[in-house]
Image (tube, rainbow, N blue to C red):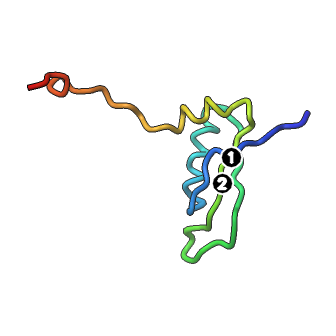
Amino acid sequence: MIVSWITLKTTAMRWEAELMQQVLSSHDIPARVISLGVGSYMGVGGPAKLQVPSEHLWTALLLLSPVDEEPEEHDLISN
């Protein structure tokens, strides 16, 4: 079976992509991190991209998207 991988996020720091990979892994969504260049100094890592199989794209996007906050009651009242 051939798996089609789609890039979900490109980041300047590999640790960010690895953290997102761990979040997806905790929800049983396969993901991989691909390095895009030479690692930088002091252990920060270089640029990387996070990829998921195409059938998991929308679930992964929802899991990694920012949480919408509920509006406060006073925000709903206009003066």
Check the image and report above or below for 55 versus 5. Answer: above
* Count of numbered badges drawn on the protein: 2
What's the distance in space between the residues labelled 1 and 2, CA to CA?
7 Å
Which three-letter amino acid code belongs to the residue tagged 1? Answer: Thr
Query: In the displayed structure, does residue 75 sit left or right of residue 23?
Result: left
Check the image and report above or below for 66 versus 75. Answer: below
Q: Secondary structure at mark 2?
A: strand
| Dot 2 crowding, Cα within 10 Å, few <14, some 14–19, many 20+ | many
Q: Residue 54, image x and y in percent?
A: 74, 34
Q: In the rendered view of the protein, which quadrant contains the N terminus?
A: top right
Q: Earlier in the sequence, mark 1 or mark 2?
A: 1
Q: Secondary structure at mark 1?
A: strand
The single residue placed furthest to the right in the displayed view is 1
> Residue at left 56%, top 50%?
19
Q: In front: 58, or 15?
A: 58
Q: Residue 70, image x and y in percent?
A: 30, 26
Q: Which residue is mark 1?
A: 7
Q: Residue 13, image x and y in percent?
A: 56, 62
Q: Residue 9, image x and y in percent?
A: 61, 49
Q: In the rendered view of the protein, which quadrant contains the C terminus?
A: top left
Check contact, mark 1 vs mark 2: CB within 8 A: yes
Image quarter of residue 15: bottom right
Q: Which residue is mark 2?
A: 49
| Dot 1 crowding, Cα within 10 Å, few <14, some 14–19, many 20+ | some
Which three-letter amino acid code belongs to the residue tagged 2? Answer: Lys
